[in-house]
Image (cartoon, rainbow, N blue to C red):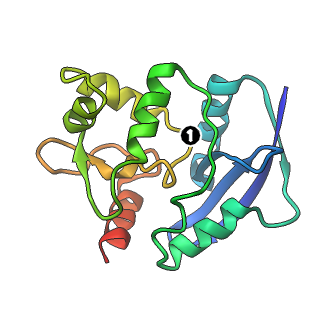
């Protein structure tokens, strides 16, 4: 069984949940109103997990607080660790290459990982990303430039995109 430390971080768009491992790597980022989803994704990716409340702020928390205050590069070097399949990890790595303030379509993301007909598979992998914001699944939009699903809700997705474009 894995044990991760949990932090609850108040933000202007809701309470953010951060789970870090013993090495300080970010393992999950979600929202308090989607806590069950976070537990489910962690279970699917790494197996049984126990979350204990963290007593001191993590590096991940500090970086995310800086990001939320406007330092959009604060997340660039933040260390993350994923479970998931090799394909999912490939998609998630590609997400981290989307520049701040830009968006791409699922089809474009599929092309970037040399799977030109894999937009649907990329979308499914995107939806299993347990580390939102840092692994910026919010930067992927529909082909018609419309906002599409975001596990934290479309209102948060729009806020994040507006924040990054400011």
Residue, x 57% and y 57% (percent of image)?
77
How packed mark 1 is, by other alpha carbons closer than 10 Å (few <14, some 14-19, many 20 or more), is: many
x 38%, y 27%: residue: 124
Please give the name of the residue rendered at 31% of the width and 78% of the height, measured from the top-left corner: 166
Q: Secondary structure at mark 1?
A: loop
- The residue pinned by badge 1 equals 130
Q: Vertically, is 161 above or below 110?
A: below
Q: Is residue 63 above or below residue 95?
A: below
Quarter of the figure with residue 8: bottom right
Q: Is residue 73 left or right of residue 25?
A: left
The image shows residue 13 at horizontal and vertical percentages of 50, 68
- In the drawing, does residue 20 fall left or right of residue 90? right
Q: In the figure, residue 9 lies in which quadrant?
A: bottom right
Q: Position of residue 126 (x, y in %)?
A: 40, 35
Q: Is residue 3 left or right of residue 92?
A: right
Between 104 and 18, the residue placed more toward the observer is: 104
Q: Quadrant of the N terminus?
A: top right
């Amino acid at each position: 069984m894995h044990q991760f430390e949990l932090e609850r971080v108040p933000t202007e768009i809701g309470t953010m949940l951060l789970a870090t491992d013993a090495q300080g790597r970010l393992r999950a980022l979600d929202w308090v109103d989607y806590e069950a989803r976070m537990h489910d994704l962690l279970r699917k990716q790494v197996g049984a997990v126990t979350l204990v409340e963290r007593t001191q702020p993590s590096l991940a928390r500090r970086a995310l607080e800086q990001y939320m205050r406007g330092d959009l590069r604060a997340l660039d070097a933040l260390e993350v660790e994923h479970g998931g399949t090799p394909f999912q990890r490939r998609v998630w790595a590609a997400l981290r290459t989307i520049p701040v303030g830009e968006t791409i379509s699922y089809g474009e993301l599929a092309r970037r990982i040399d799977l030109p007909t894999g937009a649907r598979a990329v979308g499914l992998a995107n939806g299993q990303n347990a580390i939102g914001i840092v692994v910026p699944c919010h930067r992927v939009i529909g082909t018609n430039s419309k906002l599409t699903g975001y596990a934290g809700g479309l209102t948060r997705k729009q806020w994040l995109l507006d924040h990054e474009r400011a």
